[in-house]
Image (cartoon, rainbow, N blue to C red):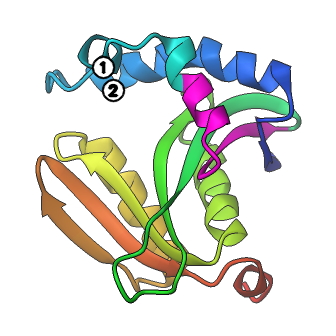
């Protein structure tokens, strides 16, 4: 099952697919009943406004995740400002979604590896502390990607995984 990723900004059909899948994504997030989601009620924004924000922010890149050229998920990577005195690039995986029929088949793992390998720098991935499945998934994937060289931070109802990617050059050494 070959997994690929592509930037969604250039394709109207990719942007439309993400917008259509966003409801499924929010339904998954609201399943833990933390009161955080659905974000549409919290922010007062509609799906279109949220997604269009991704495509109009030059620090944000939305990706469509494909299995054999068929969309199965999406991801959003944001460049974040570095701490003072830190010249490294910093990235945050702000959204990540794989449709249910493609979960537990390696699609999410492969897509994450492609994303991490694409950008060299410091990465942060945060999950809701009550989302045990997401925490297990990201611990396993980040540990594999980094050979166990990552940090975990807890706070404000979230668990964050922090690690360094060597980018495309390091990916070739895998």
Q: Nearer the viewer, residue 95 or 53?
A: 53
Q: Residues within 10 Å of mark 1 (few under 14, many from 20)?
A: few
Q: Position of residue 2 (x, y in %)?
A: 83, 49
Asked if residue 170 is positioned above or below residue 159 in the image, the reply reads below
Q: To which residue does mark 1 refer?
A: 43
Asked whether, in this view, residue 33 is left or right of residue 37, the answer is left
Which region is colored magenta? 51-67
Q: Position of residue 127 (x, y in %)?
A: 30, 48
Residue 150, quarter of picture:
bottom left
Name the residue: 33% across, 26% down.
29
Q: State the SS at label 2.
A: helix
Q: Nearer the viewer, residue 12 or 35?
A: 12
Q: CA distance from mark 1 to mark 2?
A: 15 Å
Q: Specify the quadrant that holds the C terminus.
A: bottom right
Name the residue: 50% across, 23% down.
50
Name the residue: 73% across, 79% down.
171
State if disc 2 and disc 1 touch (CB < 8 Å): no
Q: Which residue reaches farthest front?
A: 84
Q: To which residue does mark 2 refer?
A: 29
Q: Is residue 99 visible?
A: no
Q: Specify the quadrant that holds the N terminus.
A: top right
Q: Nearer the viewer, residue 66 or 106?
A: 66
Name the residue: 79% across, 38% down.
67
Q: State the SS at label 1.
A: helix
Q: Within the magenta stretch, is there residue 57?
A: yes
Q: Position of residue 168 (x, y in %)?
A: 76, 77
Q: Residues within 10 Å of mark 2 (few under 14, many from 20)?
A: some
Q: Is residue 25 visible?
A: yes
Which mark, residue 77? none
Q: Within the magenta stretch, is there residue 148?
A: no
Residue 98, quarter of picture:
top right
Q: Position of residue 99 (x, y in %)?
A: 58, 26
């Amino acid at each position: 099952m070959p997994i690929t990723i592509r930037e969604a900004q250039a394709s109207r059909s990719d942007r439309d697919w993400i917008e259509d899948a966003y409801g499924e994504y929010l339904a998954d997030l609201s399943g833990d009943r933390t009161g955080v989601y659905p974000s549409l009620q919290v922010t007062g924004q509609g799906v279109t406004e949220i997604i269009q924000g991704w495509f109009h922010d030059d620090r944000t890149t939305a990706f469509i995740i494909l299995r054999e050229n068929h969309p199965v998920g999406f991801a959003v990577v944001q460049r974040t400002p570095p701490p003072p005195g830190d010249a490294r690039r910093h990235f945050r995986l702000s959204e990540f979604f794989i449709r249910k029929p493609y979960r537990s088949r390696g699609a999410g793992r492969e897509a994450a590896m492609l994303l991490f390998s694409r950008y060299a720098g410091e990465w942060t991935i945060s999950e809701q502390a009550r989302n045990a499945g997401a925490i297990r998934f990201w611990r396993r994937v980040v540990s594999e990607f980094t050979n166990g060289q990552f940090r975990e931070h807890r706070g404000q109802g979230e668990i964050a995984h922090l690690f360094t990617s060597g980018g495309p050059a390091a990916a070739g050494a895998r």
